[in-house]
Amino acid sequence: MKTLSLKLPAELEAKLARIALEQEVSKSSLVREAIAEYVREPSSPTEGSFLAQARDLGGCVEAVEDLSTNPAHLRGLGE
């Protein structure tokens, strides 16, 4: 394995150190993973519908639950 040296701003190094400690891995390992992800070849388009691709996003937004049925929220609609 080749060695690469780089300079990091103190704030970035502190974040890297904190994450490495939390995940119980070395900072070098984290940097290798990040670089590998950055230079990874784009994958081919995923199969399936948009709904299938966005399935994990369902319910991730907090909003008024009765927005479409409560008359208070419908005032002025269509004017």
Image: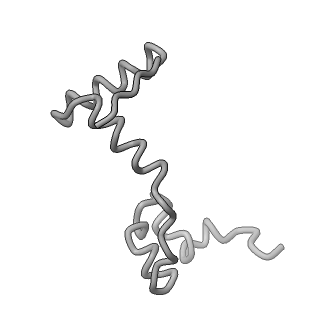
Observer-nearest of 33 and 22: 33
Position of residue 23 measured from the top left corner of the image (x, y, whole percent): 20, 36
Query: Which image quadrant is residue 15 in?
Result: top left
Name, please, the residue furthest toward the top. 10
Query: Which image quadrant is residue 78 in?
Result: bottom right
Query: Which image quadrant is residue 48 in?
Result: bottom left
Direction from residue 14 to residue 76 in the image, left or right: right
Position of residue 49 measured from the top left corner of the image (x, y, whole percent): 49, 86
Q: Quadrant of the N terminus?
A: top left
Residue at figure coordinates x 42%, y 70% from the top left: 58
Direction from residue 35 to residue 78 in the image, left or right: right
Direction from residue 25 to residue 8 in the image, left or right: right
Residue at figure coordinates x 55%, y 72% from the top left: 70
Residue at figure coordinates x 29%, y 23% from the top left: 17
Observer-nearest of 37 and 75: 37
Number of numbered discs overlaid on the protein picture: 0
The answer to whether 35 is drawn above or below residue 46 in the figure is above
Name, please, the residue furthest toward the bottom. 48
